[in-house]
Amino acid sequence: MRSSKSGKKDIIQRENAVSEIMGVALLLGIVVIMLSFEGAFIFARSGPDDLPHANLQEWMDTSEEKIYLKHCSGEPIKIEELEIVASINNTRYVYNSSNAYTETGSNGYWELGEVITLDAGSEWALDLKDYHEIDLYLVDTPTKELIQKSRLTTDFRRDPYVIGWITPRGGARDTSNGGSATLADVQKENDTFWTIYKTPTKNGTETDPNIYQEIDFGVNPCLYGYRPGDSLSNVTLKIVYRTNDNSILKIRLRFYDVDSPSNWFYREIALPEKNAFTAVYIPLTDYINSTEDLADFTVRLEAVTNADEHSHKEVNIDYLGLWIE
């Protein structure tokens, strides 16, 4: 028979064992709770703003002391969160991003196709040279991260870039009675916008040079990597137009040429009658073959109809595009 003393000892030992287990459990619970709080704190902290991802093209024109930045693809960049830093011969220059508002749209973002021009002459009183070492840094100010870094070159074509079709940006006007023309009419194909040229009745077989539709492309060759004096090897005009019926006697295009003493050099391109919108490709390399020609490139449409003056015949242009190489 076990003594009462031995029984009490067993009870005490069991109680001690339970106490140790409870202590370990409590400690584990405290550790888990602390880790939970720490995890919640870590994940609750707000991370940095997203860095915008964009592909930007930079080049410079030392003849005008200018640096050009073009948004080629990717996300729009908020102008007020953009810092543009240029390292020129190891000297740091910062471009005031507020100036970029005048270069981009009115929504405060630098978007696809838009070009920012840095005038190093007026902004930093610099005289850029071809041999200058220029590094450009585009910084996202909320994250302090680089959007892009690049070494500038005076020759845009060292880094091949597909320009594609250039649409008019200069201006548009129509002098026909009841006609109309805007840039938006000719910048996109197969939309619901096109120009209206009210065709005058015939005066013999010639068009009236005072009744025309004129589209100025407003091309800045430097934006496409061309410098003064460069030659062009391939210039093609694409025009999408219609005449609506077969009453048009003559349709012709004329082009502004700086080499002509009278400025307007009437290179006449005859266009066939097209009742539905039709694309026609016109080679112009023989006429437009220098950057000076390109900078002043303007198209003028003239036509004359056989129909009665009260028939309100018209010619429509849906798209104009210029391909250059």
Image: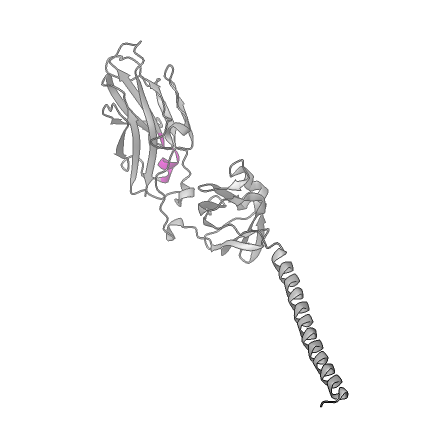
Whole-percent x, y for residue 10 in the image: 71, 84
Q: Quadrant of residue 184?
A: top left
Whole-percent x, y for residue 32 in the image: 64, 67
Task: Tell me, yes or no, whether the highlighted magenta stretch contains residue 10.
Answer: no
Residue most extreme to the front:
1
Quadrant including the C terminus:
top left
Residue 64 visible in the snapshot: yes
Q: Which residues are magenta?
A: 291-298
Q: Main secondary structure of the magenta part?
A: helix
Task: Tell me, yes or no, whether the highlighted magenta stretch contains residue 294.
Answer: yes
In the image, is 302 to the left or to the right of 127?
left
Whole-percent x, y for residue 162 in the image: 35, 46
Whole-percent x, y for residue 112 in the image: 45, 42
Closer to the camera in the image, 34 or 7 = 7
Which residue: 28% across, 27% down? 277
Which residue: 73% across, 81% down? 11
